[in-house]
Image (cartoon, rainbow, N blue to C red):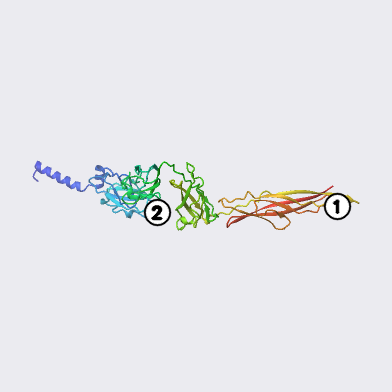
Amino acid sequence: MPARTNAQAALWLSLVAIALSGCRHPKLDTAEECAAPEANAGIDLSAEVDDVITLTAADSQVCARLTPNYTWSFESLPLESQVDDSTFTDNNSESAVETSFEPDVVGTYVVSLTVEDGVDTSAPDLVVIDIVSGNERPIADCGDNLSGDVGELIQLDGSSSHDPEGAALEYSWSLATVPAESAMTSVDLYDSSTDAPTLIPDVAGVFIASLVVSDSDQWSEPDYCSLTIGSGNETPYANAGDSNVYPPCVDNTIQLNGNASYDPEGIELEYLWSVVTVPTGSSAADNDFDDPAVSSPQFTWDLSGEYTFQLMVSDGETWSAPDLVAAEITDRAENEAPEANAGDNQTLSLSADCVSSSYEWSCEDCSESSVELDGSGSEAEDGDDISFSWSESTGDLDILAPSSAFTSVGTPSISATYGSTESLSYTVELTVSDCELSDSDEVTVDISCTGEN
C-alpha cells in the first residue's frame, strides 16, 4: 500500500474520531458534560378564585444539549377542592415549562415541579398559591356628625371611604331625612358625586346625609351622618334606653323607655318612635307601637330575632339627632327548662307534758306548729320568669302560700305517749315552670313528738 500523505492521515483520523463518537454511550457523555437539572417553580402567588393561575418553570436550570421534561403536581389542596394533576393545561412534557390551572375554592394550593432530562431528575421545588374570595364591597364612611346654623355652608367629608382592593371610588350622596319644615332635597347637595359635597341648610333641625360608594363593580352599604342645625335654641337629646335580649318566654309586647331624653333648657319634649329594622320575614312596622308619640311606648313583635328602634325628640322648635336601641327576642326553640330548688330539709322536735295518776300516765298532744320552706334558689338560666307550686300528697300539711317562692307549712297535732317518741315524715314537692317547661324538687319535713314529765 502506498504511504499516506500528511493530509490523508489527518482526514483518516478525523473519520475515525467521528465514527467512534457515534458509538459512545450517551448517558456517560451527558453525565460528564451536563449538570443535573434544578427545578424552579417560580414565586409564590396570590389571586382570586375566578382567576386562571399561570405557572412557569422558565428559571429552572437544564442542560442545553438535553431535552427537559417538566412535571407539575399538587402537594396540598384546600379541603373542599376537586382539582387534581389532570387540571393542569399542559404537564409531563417539554412544553409544560409553562402551565396553568383554575382554582375552584378559596384556600392555599401548594404545587410541586420536577424536571427530568433523560439522565437525571431534579429535586422538587414548591410554589404556594393563596386564593382569596374575590372582589370585596367598598366601605362608605360619611365622616363625623356635624353641627351648624341655618344659612351656614356645611361641608361633608367622605374621604375615609375605601375599597379593600384599593380601587378608585365613585361617590353618591343623598339627603335621607330632612326636618319637616325643610324644602331641601338631595339635589341641594352641591358636588354630590365627590368625597366632599356641601349644603346650606334652610331650617333648624336634624338633616341625615347618606353616602354610598362604588368600585365600578358593586356599591357599598350606605353610611349615615347627622347634621344638627341650630337657630340659637339648643337641640334636645334623645335617649332610647338600653338594648336588651329578651328570654324565650317573653310576652309578644315589649316596652321601650325614652325617659332619659332631655332638653338643655328644660322644655317639655315631644317624642317620635319608629322601627328601623326587623327580622327577616317579620311584618312589624311603626303601626305596631301602641303610641309612638309617648316616652315609653309598647311595641308588639311577631317573629323572634333582632328589632332596631329609633327615637327622636323635639322641644317644639328643633328635633334631636336620632338614638337607636335594639331588642333581641330569643327564639322559643332555644328555651331551657328552669331548675327547681326546694331548699333544705326541715326538722321539728316537739314535746308534750305528761302527768301520772294512779300509776297511769296521761299526756297532752304535741301542738300544731309550722316550718318555713324556701324555693328562692330555683332559677331559669335563660332569664325566663318562673312560677312556683308547692304540694304535699297526704293533705296533713297546710301550705299557706303554695304559689310563692317562700311559704309557711302548718303541721298537725300529734298524740304523745309518756317516755316515747312518735315520728312523722312528710315530703313536700316544689314545681317551677316557665311558659312551657317545668322541673321539680322535694324537701322533707320530719316531726318528732316526745311525752315528758
Badge 2 crowding class, 10 Å Cα cut-off, few under 14, some 14 to 19, many 20 or more, is few
Above or below, comparing residue 46 to residue 252 in the picture: above
At label 2, the amino acid type is Glu
Would residue 203 be seen by someone viewing this image from the given angle? yes
Badge 1 crowding class, 10 Å Cα cut-off, few under 14, some 14 to 19, many 20 or more, is some
The percent position of residue 373, horizontal first and vertical second, equals: 68, 50
The percent position of residue 374, horizontal first and vertical second, equals: 66, 49
Q: Are marks 2 and 1 in contact (CB under 8 Å)?
A: no
Marker count (numbered): 2
- Badge number at residue 80: 2
The percent position of residue 435, horizontal first and vertical second, equals: 58, 56
Q: Is residue 302 left or right of residue 430?
A: left
**Tag 1, which secondary structure?**
strand
**Tag 2, which secondary structure?**
loop
Residue at screen point 14% across, 44% down: 14
Q: Is residue 329 left or right of residue 446?
A: left
Residue in the foreground of this view, choosing between 352 and 35: 352
Camera-side mark, 2 or 1: 1
- Badge number at residue 133: none
Above or below, comparing residue 87 to residue 124 in the picture: below
For marks 2 and 1, give the CA distance.
90 Å
The percent position of residue 172, horizontal first and vertical second, equals: 33, 49
Residue in the foreground of this view, choosing between 359 and 401: 401
Mark before the other along the chain sequence, 2 or 1: 2
Residue at screen point 88% across, 50% down: 356
At label 1, the amino acid type is Ser
Q: Is residue 102 left or right of residue 16?
A: right
- Badge number at residue 362: 1
Would residue 132 be seen by someone viewing this image from the given angle? no
Residue in the foreground of this view, choosing between 124 and 394: 394
